Image: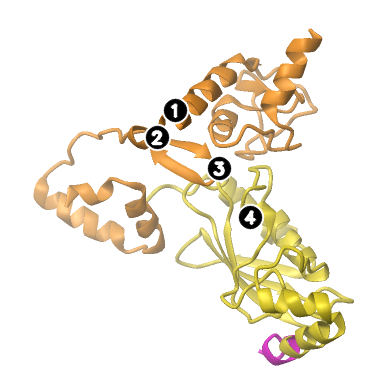
Chain colours: A yellow, B orange
Amino acid sequence: MTALPRRIIKETQRLMQEPVPGISAVPDDSNARYFHVIVTGPEDSPFEGGLFKLELFLPEDYPMSAPKVRFITKIYHPNIDRLGRICLDILKDKWSPALQIRTVLLSIQALLSAPNPDDPLANDVAELWKVNEAEAIRNAKEWTRRYAMDN
Amino acid sequence: MGNCLKGSTADDISLLRGSDGTRDSSSSDQLGPPPPYQEAMPVYYPSPNVSRPAAQLTEEEQVKIAKRIGLIQHLPAGTYDGCKKNRECVICMIEFMVGDAVRYLPCMHIYHVECIDDWLMRSFTCPSCMEPVDAALLTSYETN
């Protein structure tokens, strides 16, 4: 087993010492590269009031390649598919080693505030978001109530 | 089975299963000391998400990588002089120590040579400002 890089230790310590408001990321007891994440739905978004579970894994060559992040809680969002995979440029071709776990999770939280139906991952959701935004937002609120509250 | 230690996939799996270490130590007890470490074939990154061992690169990719190695060698390098403006290498998040080997990108961001060269072999951009390094390099040649 490779030793844990200093950077991962530092990032973990800083996440614990100065947590990001509305975000918690806790390393797994048996694997320091696997984080249990909870993101609270941003205010004034259809996800407000929800607690969304995610998993985050730092690959072997992190920070040369991006963390792998996935929603575990079901969410109705044009850029997140039914498996919880996230369409976000910084997790793919716009990754930079200057980004961190903290900035990645902040970007995901921002994505909840600003869905982008023109760059869809969940096509049916994106389609509805474009043709009938009011109904899409109602669905997102309903899913938030059903899957992201009281548990 | 010594050869399951080769290849990056075996590493990935052992990261996910903490108990692998015990099995490894028991098998090496039976076999005596492990054979000398053999360096695996270097892996290159013709594009950010594509990794391939050297022998499997297309000719076009070989040229791209050779060019990139050449360009990296032209980026100025030096030793950290204690400048207070850059305290920490954002790639490894370790504070610079006077005398560390550092590389200066055309946008004036600095990194440990080892850290930035590893990144530049994957993507020719500055991690901090995302400025393409080759374009900036050419501009600085033209203006000088």
Q: Residue furthest top?
A: B144
Which residue lies under the disc numbered 1? B62
Q: Earlier in the sequence, mark 2 or mark 1?
A: 2
Q: CA distance from mark 1 to mark 3?
A: 15 Å
Query: How far from the left and from the top, in percent, is residue B94?
Result: 62, 37
Q: CA distance from mark 2 to mark 1?
A: 6 Å
Residue B124 position (above or below residue A77): above
Of A149 and A13, the residue lying toward us: A149
Amino acid type at circle 1 is Gln
Query: How far from the left and from the top, in percent, is residue B109?
Result: 74, 28
Q: Earlier in the sequence, mark 1 or mark 3?
A: 3
Q: Are marks 2 and 1 in contact (CB under 8 Å)?
A: yes
Q: Are dots 2 and 1 on a single chain?
A: yes
Q: CA distance from mark 3 to mark 2?
A: 14 Å
Magenta residues, start to end: A144-151
Amino acid type at circle 2 is Leu
Which residue lies under the disc numbered 2? B57
Amino acid type at circle 4 is Leu
Q: Are dots 3 and 2 on a single chain?
A: yes
Q: Secondary structure at mark 4?
A: helix
Image depth: mark 4 or mark 3 in front: 3
Q: Is residue A53 left or right of residue B130?
A: left
Q: Residue A148: within the magenta?
A: yes
